[in-house]
Image (tube, grey):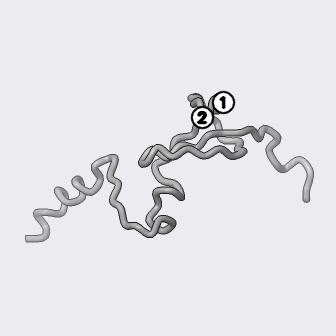
């Protein structure tokens, strides 16, 4: 392995899935400004829209999550063209 090409600032970070509130802890170098207390310990938190606990490929369930209203915008935009 080459020396000096890998980051040195690994630390424990909480990754939070915003669609189902699942939290998991792993080492990362991701920059965060917020913190979260998980099982009595405070960690920097990185918020995600989807993770392994909510992604249909891993769960086997098809679930529609539209937090930004993108589907409604698409339907409104192309509704007139379908006629």
Q: Is residue 5 above or below residue 35?
A: below
Task: Give the x, y percent position of residue 80.
Answer: 10, 63
Q: CA distance from mark 2 to mark 1?
A: 5 Å
From the image, which quarter does the C terminus lie in? bottom left
Residue under the image location 43 percent in, 48 percent down = 20
The residue that disc 1 covers is 41
Instruction: Please tell me in which quadrant of the rendered image residue 9 appears.
Output: top right
The residue that disc 2 covers is 38
Q: Is residue 43 above or below residue 83?
A: above
- In the picture as drawn, the residue positioned furthest to the left comes out as 83
Crowding at label 1, few (<14), some or many (≥20) Cα neighbours within 10 Å? Answer: few
The answer to whether mark 2 and mark 1 are in CB contact below 8 A is yes
Mark 1 element type: strand
Residue under the image location 59 percent in, 30 percent down = 37
Residue 58 left/right relative to 67: right
Residue under the image location 68 percent in, 46 percent down = 26
Mark 2 element type: strand
Residue 13 left/right relative to 56: right
Q: Is residue 33 above or below residue 3?
A: above
Instruction: Please tell me in which quadrant of the rendered image residue 40 appears.
Output: top right
């Amino acid at each position: 392995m080459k020396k000096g090409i890998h980051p040195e600032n690994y630390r424990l970070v909480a990754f939070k899935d915003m669609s189902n509130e699942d939290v998991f802890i792993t080492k990362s170098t991701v920059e965060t400004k917020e913190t979260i207390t998980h099982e009595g310990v405070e960690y920097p938190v990185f918020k995600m829209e989807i993770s392994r606990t909510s992604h249909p490929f891993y769960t086997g369930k098809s679930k529609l999550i539209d937090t930004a209203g993108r589907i409604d915008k698409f339907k409104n935009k192309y509704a007139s063209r379908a006629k």
